[in-house]
Amino acid sequence: MNFAAPLLLSLKLSSVTTLLLIVLGVPFAYWLVFTRFRWKFLVESVVALPLVLPPTVLGFYLLMVIGANSFVGQWYEAIFNKPLAFSFQGLVLGSFLYSLPFAVQPIQTAFSSVDKKLLEASWSLGRSNVYTFFRVILPLSRHGIITGCVLSFAHTLGEFGVILMIGGNVPGITRVASVAIYDEVQALNYGSANMYAAILLSFSFIILAAVYFINRRFVRTL
Amino acid sequence: MLSINLNKIWNDFELDVAFDIPRGRITALFGPSGAGKSSILRLISGLEMAEDGFISNGNETWFDKAKGINLHPQQRSVGFVFQDYALFPHMTVEKNVAYGIREKWRMKEIIDLIEIAGLTGYERHYPAQLSGGQKQRVSLIRAIARKPDILLLDEPFSALDWQTRIQLQEDVKSIIKQFNVTTMYVTHDVTEVYKLANNVIVMESGKEVKRGTPEEVFLGKRLSTRVQVTGKVVGIEHDSIMASVTILHADQFFKTLIDTEELKSLKLRVGDDVIVGVKSSDVILFKI
């Protein structure tokens, strides 16, 4: 069995998920900060759910929603001619939802900590909301976006429960490093399990240290 | 001419004002904190919306409740100078000043503006590297760079120490004069009103209580004088009958004698703003 395959799959899953989270998470966080929608607190609660929910709960309901017998599952299969559950695309969907708070919350906090006076200054200088967003809000929130990126990446890398529920353990397709560890332990291959575990541990530590380092530098230069 | 007639209620506070601001003049909104002065500027600039009334600038209607008109801040030709500067911390002086300019060919004007503000050599500095007075100068020329019809200044000097304040007041006056822009500014400092304003509107609890030139509003008929200057008391030396008061006017100091009893009744202290009136009967004139 290819030792590197689960690690590469983990990296691929984390990269795709992080990219999606940032592309969709930035406008979503902006909406959360500036909307006057009265039920916003409910949306925020749903986003934060993965922080407190056992991954198996999220995995179970996702399986119900995207499974072969569900409406979404059948619709997906009719269009793409393959099932969504137990596929890489299914894992991306699960990882996206599971890591959503890790991307959205730091970005949301960064956006809301931009001084309102700066936005008002921009508007009174004749600049639109879009221009203000790209020239003022986004540059002043870069630490939040970097934090969101890295946390999403690290969290997806370490994901286990949701993946096992909706992806199973299909070599080369859904067998990511965290699942491989479980698999190796089941087969009493402690050496391999240790290799995967040590790589994941080192990798997670390095990226977290990088975030703290970047954030410290950012605070200094401000 | 800027005409406003506005009404807005916040919990237990009601703002209700109506006045015209003449073109090319500096009008001060004077009054204690919480009188609603800053709110008027925010309503004019469109950062807040009134519940009733209208705002028109010449033939242009910016806000009219009855007609359902409410232009965005971007659509109103205003320059807003904030009390705490509101400079973009991640942009240099040059980038801050250029922020509101859309036309590429006007970019060279930025150099002139920076020079007018006495900031040549600071173009590539960030706001964190500037003093309070310098920051407020950047904020002023950034607002003027957009060539607004109306310049709004919200207590522009209150975050500065008084020496910087006195110098900056002079600079701001000359910059505003140079651009001949209609200006409204908020203050609770009499000296500032005297120094800068052509007209003053006195506000109390959301209502206008007095209006006129600074002389009309503050002096009335209390003094029969011909010459008045404003200044700040920087020293008081007591004697048995008379006291000597040192006053700073612009960058000049002068001393005047005052009856000790009068000093007591005035409760004059160092740091107070005062108006010094000189009676016309005993003035020495020099031809220059």
Image (cartoon, rainbow, N blue to C red):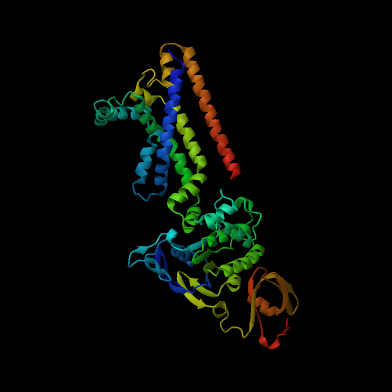
Position of A201 compared to B238: left or right? left
Measured along the vertical axis of the image, is residue A36 above or below residue B246? Answer: above
Where is A157 relative to A192, above or below? below
Task: Name the side, left or right, on which B269 lies relative to B155.
Answer: right
* Along the line of sight, the residue nearer the viewer: A11 or A58: A11
Above or below: residue B229 compared with residue A204: below
**Residue farthest toward the top in the current orientation of the protein:** A188
| Residue lying at 44% horizontally and 24% vertically, measured from the top left | A10
Residue at position x 53%, y 75% in the image: B199
Pinpoint residue B74: horizontal percent, then vertical percent. 44, 58
Q: Name the residue: 46% across, 48% down.
A: A133
Examine the rendering and report whether any part of residue B186 can be seen.
Answer: yes
Q: Residue furthest right?
A: B239
Q: How many marks?
A: 0
Asked if residue A19 is positioned above or below residue A190 in the image, the reply reads below
Query: Quadrant location of the C terminus of chain B?
Result: bottom right
Residue B86 visible, this orientation: no
> What is the quadrant of residue A159 in the picture?
top left
Give whichever of A162, A153 is nearer the camera.
Answer: A153
Where residue A216 appears, as percent x and y from the top left, is 58, 38
Measured as percent of width and height from the top left, residue A217 is found at: 59, 39
Location of residue A41 (image quadrant): top left
**Which of A126 and B20 lies nearest the eye of the viewer?**
A126
Q: Which of B160 and B97 is in front in this view?
A: B97
- Residue displayed at 51% across by 73% down: B202
Residue farthest to the bottom? Answer: B281
